Image: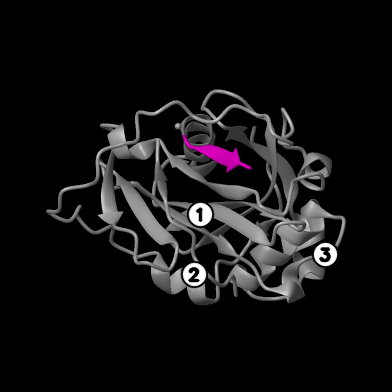
Amino acid sequence: MPRMPLPRLAAAVIATAALLPLSGCIYAQIPADVPAAEDTTAPAPDDSPTTAPGDGIPTTMSFDDGLSLPSTTYIQWGDGLLVDEGWEMASPDDGQGNWSYATVDGACTAHFWQGTIGADMQVAGDDSATSDAVIAAVLGGSPDDITPNATTGAFSYQVGGNTDVENRQVVGQDTGRTWIMAARAFSEVGVGLYVIVDCTTGDPAAVLAEIADTNSVVVTP
């Protein structure tokens, strides 16, 4: 399983794949009935400018670009849903790098994770294969099961509205729900992040595209 969490940062192309069953530890974390948002005060978003690429940080983040990151690089989600009126907090950060949102109509949830990954998941010189290994650790099975069923998509980089961070994606279904998982891991830094969009109605791929557009991957040296 992915291991240590990282602190969150409050801030800001999808393709189809073979359908996989949603199993393993993550299924228990996605409720069949989306809970109402908790009556808590969320922290205010960070309005400070997002760090622009520099200081050894590539201007894009393809799988190959990730191999050039300095060992001191800090990588985390930029939380664009925090101020999105179409979403509400379903479960706050649990201190282990997990939190989730639900759409206000209750149709979809988005479960986020970020943190460090174990050495057994790090494929030296290959961020794509390392990303597949993270997906396998979450869903169960081996990377050999994931790789032929996964496709390459993208998250936004530093700020929303672009497709500059390559990721790996799988889509699947269970009774009454369809889901899609997108993950990016960084083999040189030993860090990963993912989001699972789980919907009872509607198109989870379209919801993921919305999330990818507003929730950036923030990389700082």
Mark 2 lies on residue: 26
Q: Residue at x 56, y 54 (%)?
A: 194
CA separation in Å, label 3 and label 1: 22 Å
As measured in the structure, the alpha-carbon distance from the residue carrying label 1 to the one carrying label 2 is 9 Å
- Identify the amino acid type marked 1: Ile
Q: Quadrant of residue 141?
A: bottom right
Q: Are the residues tagged 3 and 2 within 8 Å (C-beta)?
A: no
Foreground residue among 192 and 211: 192
**Which quadrant of the figure contains the C terminus?**
top right
Please give the residue where the numbered disc 1 appears in the rendered image.
196
Report whether residue 15 is seen.
no
- Left or right: where 190 falls relative to 144: left
Residue 53 horizontal/vertical position (percent): 65, 29
- The answer to whether residue 26 shows anywhere in this view is yes
Range drawn in magenta: 215-221
Near mark 2 (Cα within 10 A), the count class, few <14, some 14-19 or many ≥20, is some
